[in-house]
Image: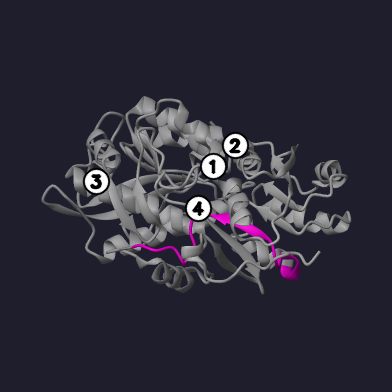
């Protein structure tokens, strides 16, 4: 294992002191030793996923603050302060998996997921082997949950709904409806699964479909893929992407002279950096989101979605994004399951997670037999005047869809 990763400093949220770590197989901090319950979190603080990883860590930090403000985690007649031990996985799946093993060696059995599907998939296999338990905040690829794992639970909607939700929103809201959709996708597992879900939804809606055309994950030049769909003059271009590729699509659609009525993208548009980077060029772009401040539901720790947004702004100086929210929801789910189990034993917590059914600021959290949260819908936002406005589903809409979105 890379020594630069192995010996990074362990960061503790707030001023909480970590309890001493046990050796493998012995009771450690996540067994509730002393007066502190310590969760392990490998997060992407450097590398290509650093921005999303930082937003994930912010969500975990706010959760710790809120839980401790309520007194802590009530477990078997004791109340434990909550802490998180962080390590930087440098955006690499192999490192993310190795760090989960390292947490296990320290006796930390309760784990919060890293950022992204590749990292989460690598971690899930280790979690299963070590009899740990993980709540996944951002690994959405459906394929993670098709492998029979029993100890990984995802609070977020699955990857197959990301691009599909944009298609469904356009079919429901756009007038006149578009007739053709071209799909572009990064070549990572999450993005390809999301694109496949979008293609299926577009065909079901009766749209003519082109693609998906693939480009390398993390690409900042997607012109080759765009040139391949240019000849079909699609009404809508949907990118199954992360931030870097999403920014590139918006820039290069204009540079190459494509004139779609709308651009829709997964992941990128709700990220605060999207508008900051693109400025006025971001206006009109549609994005799928796990959460917005228009989502209904509340809980005793975070209140409702608007209160959550206010807390993120106060703590970190920017509007809450869904990367923040899904991380806080994952942490909350693990806390609630530990309290329900009345124990920090990972198998008891696993069983409590499997039976969990709660309404939170993030929406409903209830897992199916594979560990997916299939009860919470995706939402679709549109950048309007530099702000992300929820436009779909209709019962959560903050504003109307601007159509044609790009004025073409």
Label disc, if present, on residue 40 of the rendered structure:
none
Q: Is residue 281 magenta?
A: yes
Q: Judging from the image, what secondary structure is the residue with disc 1 in? A: helix
Label disc, if present, on residue 159 of the rendered structure:
1
Q: Earlier in the sequence, mark 2 or mark 4?
A: 2
Closest to the observer, 273 or 383? 383
Label disc, if present, on residue 193 of the rendered structure:
2
Q: Report the span colored magenta.
A: 279-297
Report crowding for label 1: few under 14, some 14 to 19, many 20 or more residues within 10 A (C-alpha): many
Closest to the observer, 305 or 179? 179
Disc 2 and disc 3: Cα gap in Å?
A: 32 Å
Disc 3 and disc 1: Cα gap in Å?
A: 27 Å
Where does residue 347 sit, x and y in percent of width and height?
25, 33
- Tags 2 and 1 touching, CB below 8 Å: yes
Label disc, if present, on residue 338 of the rendered structure:
3
Position of residue 222 relative to residue 187, above or below, is below
Q: Is residue 174 magenta?
A: no
Q: Judging from the image, what secondary structure is the residue with disc 2 in? A: helix
At a point 56% along the width and 71% down the height, the residue shown is 399
At a point 35% along the width and 28% down the height, the residue shown is 130
Disc 2 and disc 1: Cα gap in Å?
A: 6 Å
Q: Earlier in the sequence, mark 2 or mark 3?
A: 2
Q: Is residue 202 left or right of residue 76?
A: right
Disc 3 and disc 4: Cα gap in Å?
A: 27 Å
Report crowding for label 4: few under 14, some 14 to 19, many 20 or more residues within 10 A (C-alpha): many
């Amino acid at each position: 294992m890379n020594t630069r990763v192995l010996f990074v400093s362990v960061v503790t949220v707030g001023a909480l002191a970590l309890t001493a770590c046990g050796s493998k197989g012995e009771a450690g901090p996540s067994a509730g030793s002393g007066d502190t319950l310590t969760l392990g979190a490998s997060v992407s603080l450097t590398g290509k996923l650093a921005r999303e990883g930082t937003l994930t860590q912010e969500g975990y930090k706010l959760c710790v603050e809120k839980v401790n403000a309520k007194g802590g985690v009530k477990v078997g007649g004791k109340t434990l302060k909550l802490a998180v031990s962080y390590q930087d996985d440098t955006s690499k799946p192999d490192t993310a998996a190795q760090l989960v093993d390292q947490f296990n060696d320290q006796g930390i059995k309760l784990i919060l997921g890293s950022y992204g599907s590749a990292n989460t998939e690598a971690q899930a296999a280790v979690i299963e082997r070590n009899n740990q338990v993980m709540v996944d905040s951002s690994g959405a690829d459906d394929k993670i949950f098709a492998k029979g794992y029993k100890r990984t639970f995802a609070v977020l909607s699955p990857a197959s709904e990301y691009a599909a939700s944009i298609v469904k929103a356009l079919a429901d809201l756009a007038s006149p409806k578009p007739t053709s959709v071209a799909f572009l996708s990064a070549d990572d597992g999450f993005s390809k699964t999301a694109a496949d879900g979008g293609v299926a939804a577009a065909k079901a809606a009766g749209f003519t479909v082109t693609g998906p055309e693939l480009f390398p994950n993390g690409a900042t030049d997607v012109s080759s893929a765009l040139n391949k769909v240019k000849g079909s003059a699609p009404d809508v271009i949907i990118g199954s992407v992360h931030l870097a590729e999403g920014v590139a699509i918006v820039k290069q659609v204009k540079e190459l002279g494509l004139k779609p009525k709308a651009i829709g993208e997964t992941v990128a548009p709700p990220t605060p950096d999207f508008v900051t980077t693109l400025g006025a060029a971001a206006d009109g772009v549609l994005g799928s989101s796990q959460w917005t401040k228009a989502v209904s539901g509340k809980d005793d720790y975070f209140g409702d979605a608007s209160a959550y947004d206010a807390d993120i702004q106060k703590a970190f100086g920017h509007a809450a994004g869904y990367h923040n929210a899904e991380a806080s929801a994952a942490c909350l789910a693990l806390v609630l399951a530990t309290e329900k189990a009345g124990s920090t034993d990972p198998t008891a917590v696993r069983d409590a997670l499997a039976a969990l059914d709660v309404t939170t600021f993030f929406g409903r959290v209830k897992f199916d037999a594979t560990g997916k949260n299939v009860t919470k819908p995706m939402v679709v936002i549109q950048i309007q005047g530099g702000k992300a406005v929820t436009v779909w589903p209709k019962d959560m809409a903050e504003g109307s869809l601007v159509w044609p979105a790009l004025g073409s």
